[in-house]
Image: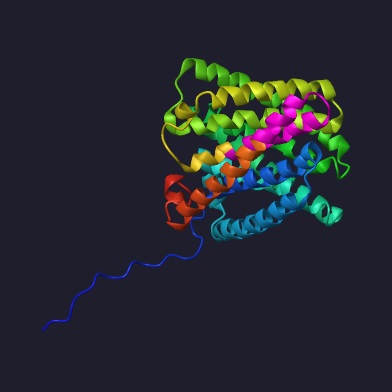
């Protein structure tokens, strides 16, 4: 009797050889949720317990994912540039550095020196991405030069830094970043509107449209921190209009079903909730406070679910394939 023949075992791959940067997009949203719960303290007299718990849990997850991603980059540094060439990778890399800027806010209560160090490292990381993407756009094909919502994360992303920078005394930096980011965001909004007027947005890419909400909300938040009360109100109204335009077409936005790009829904929703609660706390109108509270509830219910589903794709080995992540 012949012994049974079994197929050869699949070849094992090394750990973290294709870690997808798309993992960082919902992590960015979770950090934004922690910030939003911090804003709820003034708007609804909520303690810092929920915010501190979120900051702690997300920080641990973020540090783990940093190790997992840079384990790939250290083995072959070119993987970083390869990830930056594609939309999901570029958005994930931006979310990686921007998450560090929000992580700094959670560290301020523990150590201002540590928070300032983390913020500086995150700003440098984002500057590296900024230069890399500019180079790729300048030297890439014509299609690579088209404006996408990801441009907000890459080129307007520095506006996240004043959220922790202002409490740390980075006033001059925050002023420069605010006005530069406002100008770039206006350009991206205008260029995107012109493109959308000429061509239809493919269903799989529609979740990225939610990113247009984020710069308006964060710019409004920073305007309040800088004392630009009227401008903050204007940006709050702009944010509300963008948010209304997005939620009025939910089935159109999600027509292609769940994908890793749903991470684009996370931070804009959290940032919008934060701005609305800040405007309500500043005494503009109770309406803002109630809108912010509703948005906070929606963000609390939605963002962890999206993070969980994205992590499931990673655990099954599907996330890297779906986002075309680079490999060692």
Residue 72 image-quadrant placement = bottom right
Residue 17 seen: yes
State the residue in front, 207 or 158. 207
Is residue 8 shown left or right of residue 27? left
Q: What predominant SS class does the magenta segment belong to? A: helix
Please tell me whether residue 246 is drawn above or below residue 305 in the rendered image.
Answer: above
Q: How is the image coloured?
A: rainbow
| Number of numbered discs on residues | 0
Is residue 200 shown left or right of residue 176? left
State the residue in front, 183 or 274. 274
Confirm whether the magenta stretch covers residue 198. Answer: no
Residue under the image location 75 percent in, 40 percent down: 40
State the residue in front, 62 or 243. 243
Span shown in magenta: 266-294
Residue 79 pos. (x, y %): 53, 51
Residue under the image location 44 percent in, 33 percent down: 204
Residue 154 seen: no
Residue 25 pos. (x, y %): 58, 44
Confirm whether the magenta stretch covers residue 289. Answer: yes
State the residue in front, 322 or 308. 308
Furthest toward the bottom, the residue is 1
Please tell me whether residue 312 is drawn above or below residue 225 in the rendered image.
Answer: below
Residue 90 pos. (x, y %): 56, 41
User: In which quadrant will I find the N terminus?
Assistant: bottom left
Residue under the image location 84 percent in, 40 percent down: 166
Residue 109 pos. (x, y %): 83, 53
Residue 114 image-quadrant placement = bottom right
Please tell me whether residue 292 is drawn above or below residue 58 in the rendered image.
Answer: above
Residue 163 image-quadrant placement = top right
Please tell me whether residue 297 is drawn above or below residue 75 in the rendered image.
Answer: above
């Amino acid at each position: 009797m012949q012994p049974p023949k079994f197929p050869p075992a699949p070849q094992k791959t090394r750990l973290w050889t294709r870690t997808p940067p798309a993992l960082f997009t919902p992590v960015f949203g979770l950090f934004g949720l922690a910030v939003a719960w911090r804003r709820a303290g003034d708007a609804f007299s909520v303690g810092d317990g929920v915010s501190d718990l979120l900051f702690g849990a997300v920080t641990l997850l973020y540090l783990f994912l940093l190790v997992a991603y840079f384990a790939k980059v250290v083995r072959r540094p070119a993987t970083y540039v390869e990830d930056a060439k594609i939309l999901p990778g570029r958005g994930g890399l931006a979310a990686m550095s921007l998450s560090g800027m929000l992580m700094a806010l959670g560290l301020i209560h523990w150590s201002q020196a540590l928070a300032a160090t983390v913020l500086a490292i995150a700003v440098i990381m984002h500057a590296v991405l900024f230069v890399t993407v500019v180079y790729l756009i300048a030297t890439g094909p014509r299609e690579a030069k088209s404006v996408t919502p990801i441009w907000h994360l890459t080129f307007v992303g520095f506006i996240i830094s004043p959220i922790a920078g202002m409490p740390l005394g980075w006033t001059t930096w925050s002023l420069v970043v605010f006005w530069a980011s406002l100008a770039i965001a206006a350009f991206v909004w205008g260029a995107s509107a012109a493109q959308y007027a000429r061509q239809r947005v493919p269903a799989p890419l529609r979740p990225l449209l939610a990113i247009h909400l984020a710069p308006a909300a964060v710019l409004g938040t920073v305007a309040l921190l800088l004392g630009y009360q009227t401008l903050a109100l204007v940006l709050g109204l702009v944010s509300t209009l963008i948010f209304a335009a997005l939620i009025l077409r939910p089935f159109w936005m999600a027509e292609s079903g769940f994908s890793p790009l749903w991470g684009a829904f996370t931070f804009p929703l959290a940032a919008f909730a934060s701005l609305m609660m800040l405007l309500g706390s500043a005494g503009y109108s109770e309406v803002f406070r109630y809108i912010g509270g509703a948005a906070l509830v929606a963000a609390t219910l939605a963002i962890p679910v999206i993070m969980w589903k994205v992590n499931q794709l990673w655990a099954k080995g599907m996330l890297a394939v779906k986002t075309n992540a680079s490999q060692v």
